[in-house]
Image (cartoon, coloured by chain):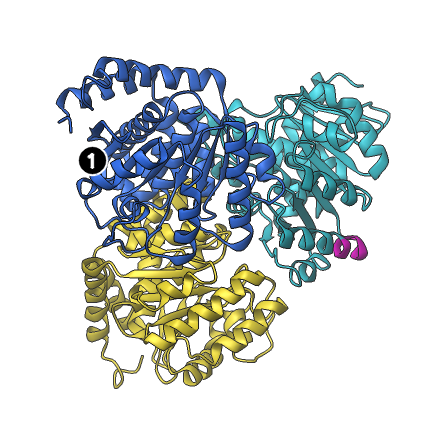
Chain colours: A cyan, B yellow, C blue
Amino acid sequence: MTSAVLPSYDLAARTGAALSELRARTPLVQCVTNEVTSNLVANAVLAIGASPAMASVPGEAEELAGSAGAVLVNLGTPGPDQRACVEATVAAAVGAGVPWVLDPVAVGVLSVRTRLAARLLAERPTVVRGNASEVRALAGEASSGRGVDARDAVEAAASAARALAGATGGAVAVSGPVDLVTDGSATLRLAVGDPFLARVTGAGCALGGLTAAFAAVTDPVVAAVGASTALGVAAERAAVVARGPGSFVVALLDELSLLSADDVAARVGAELAVGVPA
Amino acid sequence: MTSAVLPSYDLAARTGAALSELRARTPLVQCVTNEVTSNLVANAVLAIGASPAMASVPGEAEELAGSAGAVLVNLGTPGPDQRACVEATVAAAVGAGVPWVLDPVAVGVLSVRTRLAARLLAERPTVVRGNASEVRALAGEASSGRGVDARDAVEAAASAARALAGATGGAVAVSGPVDLVTDGSATLRLAVGDPFLARVTGAGCALGGLTAAFAAVTDPVVAAVGASTALGVAAERAAVVARGPGSFVVALLDELSLLSADDVAARVGAELAVGVPA
Amino acid sequence: MTSAVLPSYDLAARTGAALSELRARTPLVQCVTNEVTSNLVANAVLAIGASPAMASVPGEAEELAGSAGAVLVNLGTPGPDQRACVEATVAAAVGAGVPWVLDPVAVGVLSVRTRLAARLLAERPTVVRGNASEVRALAGEASSGRGVDARDAVEAAASAARALAGATGGAVAVSGPVDLVTDGSATLRLAVGDPFLARVTGAGCALGGLTAAFAAVTDPVVAAVGASTALGVAAERAAVVARGPGSFVVALLDELSLLSADDVAARVGAELAVGVPA
């Protein structure tokens, strides 16, 4: 992130402050999400301090979207009912000025969700959070993605992420060994997290939920930075005590709940200090 | 619970005996439930000693309902297929005289499930288990509920719970820091549980499953008391070893399985001894 | 397994080698599976070393099936959309020569899935993995099954399993206290596992996922033997540290990830040494 755009001390302090505010306000986060990982998403949103609603029925999801603090739309299981629900929910969020996060799971690989994602982009998601393959696909680039695996390197998606952010007017976060966040002009890198995150199902989905939780209380870039840092630091701590992927997920939720605003602020500051502006 | 209705030593002993019988008979509990928390519900039903069936497809759910020991209907994710399934399942249970439990998740806040719940009430659920906002909404009172959060105090729902129980002829349980159980005339309070229950998704849904498990072997009031006490005592024990919400859920299932009939009977007796009859 | 068909040292070595190859190749395993246990299935497939895809939407599931290493079809929640998805997915797998595993959850008890399973059998699943009641029902025998419980003894399903394998040309695995694997002529028994497996939801579903992961890299009998042994040994180790069913599932995933190819090969060899050929 070039210092002209956002001084690092400011971003660090603002990210910590966002976590404090999130816990004080416990915003309602309405999630239309992946059926495989919905339980983990709900628990991650609770663990960070927000209040998840998982209404995913047409006629109900949009009722909550307009009054929620933020909305998460995850395209991991886009059955016919859920597609109708997603479109109504996004329309309600946009109509009410509620920030919304798009998690384009496996977009670019599977056709139904790829078409849906293209339509949703026109509604300008506040934050897009995906892996490198998904972000490249969303931006219209060819990718080497295979299902939900991220085969593309994060850095290879940097220009796609910037183009996408330019088009939406929001932030775009690319997850990987190093997370990348951009608002279309400045680009920031965060070397947080642990390889265990790729060994459990739903870590990316949980990050989408955390991003929405932060987006309810702060601007898009701070939301993406806060969610990546919170998940990443919690994962590093969980990895210390985990024997394998089962105990890792358990510890990850524990650590999310134990994370302090100072922990997050300090880590963002440290990452920015070593970051290479681009 | 006024002693004229149900002497406390009797209720305590009967609740313990119900847990013993549940484990001896391992009744089949057919659950049409919330997709977000179905795994936890199934594991909670298994942990207490019953046998969960999660048939939720129209044409199948009702096949099991008629021969099950009890039926759980949770309205947390009422998509079109599930609504059809719920109505057929309840009809089959009622037709066969099988006890059934209604968990009216977020009723009063979301419109589709609120209409469905109103129709289901006419089928007289054996036990209704909800939070204060849900029970007030079911009874036709305005509430301050926000999605699945219980913003209303349990005590504020006491008269609604009694009215509801009077209408159904069954028991109504209101969950919160203090659980309340009523059959429409007597009202009992149980100060069991731990704040961790509100920090994980699906604790209320699990309680619905436990209530159905107990309802397969005992009367509605004992079923509601047994389920609340079992979950509450297990939660208190789990909280002692939990570092956060992840390890809490793991320990909660462990403790449900380790709970003895004597543990439950003793705690019911202790609660009744300090309870204020109303 | 009669030694004329498959010498035990060969089967043991081949099973260990299959686990090594699975981890080297991380095959994509496309799962159309039970909504109640999909998270556990995905995590089990990840823990053993493969890459799960959970595409379950008509129009998408079949896109992945043709290019996957193997396909899992679990009939636990056969709603209308999922049934369409299952048939298209199996057709795509068969058309592309991709091995596929059928997990006939509660077939014989519930009508919708029983009809679906009968149609799927004509597509000759590479491996059928079920409990004794399910395998007997699939083979057209009456059974004493009750929902997802296996009331029939494994041994009582031996002839049904052989008949089924003869009809499909693949392998059939019957899970229980002793697992049985047959290719229609030889029959092998593996006394692996722990009673805890029956006290958590989805252990059988996880076994289906593991079987598909192995089937992506080896022949049907070795796949069934490898999956049963991997789950069984992991369960035995998890049971040592578990306090109850909650901590058992956590430890089960940990142990699956920690299992070595030598562990599996040694156990298969030991089981075959004591086995009674039939």
Q: Which residues are magenta?
A: A91-97
The three-letter amino acid code for the residue at tag 1 is: Val
Q: Residue at x 39, y 58 (%)?
A: C111
Q: Position of residue B139 (x, y in %)?
A: 52, 79
Left of C275 or right of it: where is A221? Answer: right
Q: Main secondary structure of the magenta part?
A: helix
- Can residue A167 be seen here? The reply is yes
Q: Position of residue B168 (x, y in %)?
A: 42, 82
Q: Closer to the camera, B61 or C160?
A: C160
Q: Closer to the camera, B43 or A221?
A: B43
Question: Label 1 marks which chain's residue?
Answer: C
Q: To which quarter of the image does residue C235 belong?
A: top left
What residue did someone put label 1 on?
C178
Would you say residue A134 sits in the magenta stretch? no
Q: Quadrant of the C terminus of chain C?
A: top left
Q: Position of residue C263 (x, y in %)?
A: 28, 18
Secondary structure state at the residue bearing disc 1: loop
Q: Closer to the camera, C138 or C204?
A: C138
Q: Residue at x 73, y 44 (%)?
A: A116
Q: Quadrant of the N terminus of chain C?
A: top left
Query: Tag 1: Cα neighbours inside 10 Å, few (<14), some, or many (≥20)?
Result: some
Q: Give the vertical position of B129 relative to B247 (above or below).
A: below
Left of A277 or right of it: where is C265? Answer: left
